[in-house]
Amino acid sequence: MISVFIRCTLLFRLMFGFSLCLPMTPSRGTRSSLIALCLRLPTFELRLELVRSPGLDATSVALLRPGEGRSARQVIWQVSERAAAAGVRPGMRVSEAVSLCPSLTLLEPDPAHYAAATEAILECLGAMSPILEPVEPGVVLVGMDGLERLYGSPREQVDRMLHALLRVLPRPLVAAVRAGRAPGTFAARVAAVAARPGEPVLVGEGGLASFLADQPIESLPLPVDAVARLHRLDIHTLGALGSLPVAALLRHFGADGREARALARGERIDPVRARHRPRPVRVSLELPAAVGDRDTLHRALDRVLTRLLAHPGRRDRALKGLRVGGHLEEGGSWQIEVTLREAAARRETLAFPVRSRMELYPPPRALETLFVEAFEFGAPATQTSLFSRRELGAGRAPANDDPLTTGPVGEALRRAVRELHLRLGDAPLYRVVEVDPWSRIPERRHALLPLDGG
């Protein structure tokens, strides 16, 4: 068939002067996109709080930094425009911010609310494009390759994406989203920063270099000291950096200088890569009354973990990453994350690190609800049979020179054998191995061999 196609192609070239070509389509397993759309909503968390409390929109508002411990919540995280005009800046201590702006309203963070809003945005955009790359809360990269036939021109594509966000976000938040569409993730993020609400920046392949040339040097993913060093060298735009020779950048900045030059000139185009996000499994418990007692919280935690392990969405997988939190009395939420070194599927193994984390970073107030969410999983926790046909070989008797005392042993059983060796000095565990299954003497058909867990 290939030879026939080549002959037909040559015949068309000779007779009609053009070539017969098949359309180039991405492979079925492609999970990346060269054309990127960056949707950016500055101060995403603070805007969510102002939507819940519209009366605060005309006042000076600051959102405290989320974190584990009371010291983290004594630092300003995000500020409104009125608070910024009064001199309040992110990273300030609360005492300094209040001295600058006595009428400043301080809001406690609600991480559970922010996480739910982010998940809703990803679910909404995932219905429009299969390639999503969440960068941070409020910043999402969307792969746009092949969407022309579905949504039309580049501007129409952006409008369709923004219109889809109205399903999960209020109209004032969608109106504040800044959109940038360009080849590669770097150019798309730069375009989103340069865009204004309601005025997306669309960059084509032909105008990529000229667009990047006028952008500030702070757009590059470089350390702060490297950016300051470039300013001392009178380099303030990407165009000025791109005009420098590679040798000079290598001498001053090493390999980072070469990569920065390629990004500034539009020579390096990083595609949007779809991130595998396993669907989290979440179980919550409504407490009959607000609970702040440690022992009561531990008992509630055991109950929620039992429900989580029995949840059908776990599909017998071991759990490696847990997110524990709840809604606080009088509003707000509390949340901690625990990542285990090894995935586990026993309640006692999961509860110990969570309790230790709760001791270090307890809830600031009593909890009205408690939830546990598994966001990272390990292999299935089902234990395979020790003497399965897969381990010994189907229908095969071990050869005489095989090390019969060793072989593939399950990880759980191997740990148990090692523990018995440490406690007793010897593991009284044996397994039956076929030696001569066709022998007329029953004692010769099988052998009892010690089990080695090494």
Image: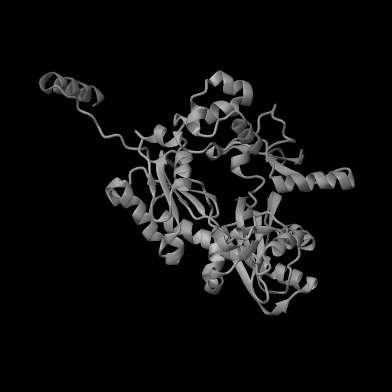
Q: Residue 140: x, y in percent? A: 48, 50
Residue 417 at least partly seen: yes
Give the quadrant of the C terminus. top right
Closer to the camera, 439 or 87? Answer: 87
Q: Residue 23: x, y in percent? A: 26, 34
Within the image, what quadrant is residue 58 found in? bottom right
Within the image, what quadrant is residue 107 found in? bottom right
Write the residue at 66% across / 29% down: 399
Write the residue at 52% across / 23% down: 244
Looking at the image, which residue sits at the far bottom? 288
Q: Residue 410: x, y in percent? A: 68, 45
In the image: residue 176, left or right of residue 379: left
Residue 229 drawn above or below residue 86: above
Residue 140 drawn above or below residue 107: above
In the image: residue 255, left or right of residue 175: right
Q: Residue 119: x, y in percent? A: 51, 59
